[in-house]
Amino acid sequence: MRLHEYQTKQIFNKYGIPIPRGKIALYAGEVKQIADEIGGPIVVKAQVLVSGRGKAGGIRLAKSAKDAEEIAAYILGMEIKGLPVHKVLIEEAVIFNQEIYLAITIDREAGLPVLMASGSGGMDIEEVALRSPEKILRLQINPLLGIQEYHARLIAINMDLSRQHWRQFSKVLAEMWKVFRDCDATLVEINPLVITGDNRQIALDGKMIIDDNALFRQANLAELRWLEAENPIDTESRKFGLSYIPLKGKVGCMVNGAGLAMTTMDLINSFGGEPANFLDIGGGANAEKVSAALKIILSDPHVTTVLINIFGGITRCDEVARGIIATLYEVESQIPIIVRLSGTNAKEGMQILAERNLNIANSLSEAARLAVDFSQRVPNGNTH
C-alpha cells in the first residue's frame, strides 16, 4: 500500500524528521489562505501515487499567494500518468545547498533491510542509479539492531558529508529506521533530504510503501489507502481474501491452496498451455468467495478457458459448485469451464454442477489437457 507524500510527511513529523511547513488543499480556493499563513514563496505539489510529478508539471513554485492559487487551480485539473489530481500540498519553498537521497527497503536476496544513500539526490536519482551506480551506497541492516550511529558515520564519510552535519544526519537515519520498523514498511524514502544555508536538514519529499500483509496490525495506516489509484481487480481480490496474480496466458486458474495452484500451473505448461493467473481461494472458501474469484478470472480479456481444480478438505466441493453456478447465472460468458472436484462433498458438488453444461474432469491431468485444448481453439481473448 503506497502513501501520498503528505501522508508520509505527517508520519515523518510524528517521528521528529524535519519537514517543510505546509498544508493539504482540495480546492484552489483554499490555497490563498494557506499560502498567506505560510508566507514567502510557495511550492504547490500534486498529490498522486506516481513518480515523475515534477517533470510532468505537477510541482511548481509560486512567488505569491495569488500565484499559488492560480497554479493550484491548474494542477488540480491535471492528470499525471492517467491519474487525476484531487489534492495539492502547499508548502514553504526551501532554499538549500545540498541534496541527499535516502531510502530503507528490503534486500530480498539477502532477506534483510537495506539502507541506500547517495550524495546526488533529487529528481534525477534514477539517472544516477543507471549511469553511476557506484554513487548509490548500500548497507544491510540487522533488523534486531536497526541503524546505529556508526552506520550513519560510515554513510556520511563515504558520501563526503561535512562533519558538522553528522549529528543531525544520524538522527534522521535513526528515525527513518523507526518509521520503517513501526509501520511495517517495505520502503521509506526521502528524496531529497536537503541541507539549507543555515545548516538545517529537511525532508523535502517522502515516499512510503506499507506491507499489505501487515495491515491487520496497522489499522490507522490501512485507513489511508487510496483505492482510486489501485487496479479494481486488486481491490476486489483483497476484499474477499483471494491471492490473485495476473499472468500472460489464456488459461484462467482457480485452485485452493498455493501448492496445488503451482502444480496446476505446471501441468498446464506441460501440455503446451500458459496460465492466465495464479488464484488461490484458500481453505474453507464459501460460495460467495468462489463466485468472486470466478468473476475476477472472467473479467480478464485474455482468458479463453477456465480450469477450476479443487481438492476438498476444509473447503467443501458443494460450496465451490454453488459459487460456480451462482456466477454463471449472473455473468453471461461463452468461455469453456473445466472443473475437477475431489475430496469433501465432491459427489454433492458434481450433482450441483450437473444442471449446467460444464466440462467435468476425473483427474487433474485430464482437466489440464482439456483446458489447454480449449484455450488453443480460440486465438484471441474472451468475449462475454
Image (cartoon, rainbow, N blue to C red):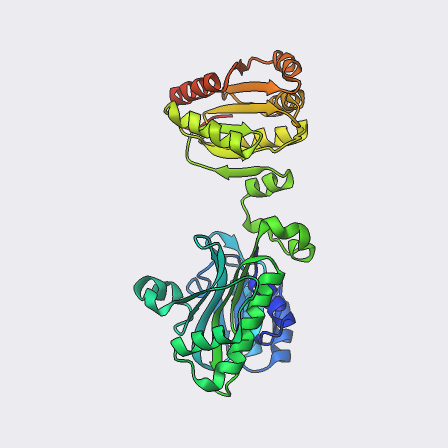
Q: Is residue 362 above or below residue 57?
A: above
- Left or right placement of residue 249 versus residue 141 in this view: left
Seen from this angle, which residue lies furthest left? 131
* Residue closer to the observer: 178 or 131: 178
Q: Is residue 346 left or right of residue 334?
A: right
Q: Can you give x and y, in whole percent of width and height, for residue 231 in the image? A: 54, 44
Q: How many marks?
A: 0
Query: Against 186, is 65 above or below?
Result: below
Judge whether residue 95 can be spotted in this image.
no
Q: Quarter of the image holding residue 177?
A: bottom right
Residue drawn at (60%, 69%), measured in percent from left and top? 12
Front-most of residues 189 and 378: 189
Residue 32 in view:
yes
Q: Position of residue 246 (x, y in %)?
A: 48, 38
Examine the rendered structure and indicate whether residue 227 appears above or below residue 92: above
**Relative depth, front residue between 354 and 83:** 354
Query: Could you say where residue 7 lies in the image, as x and y percent from the top left?
Result: 61, 63
Find residue 260 and report its horizontal and vertical position in percent. 52, 29
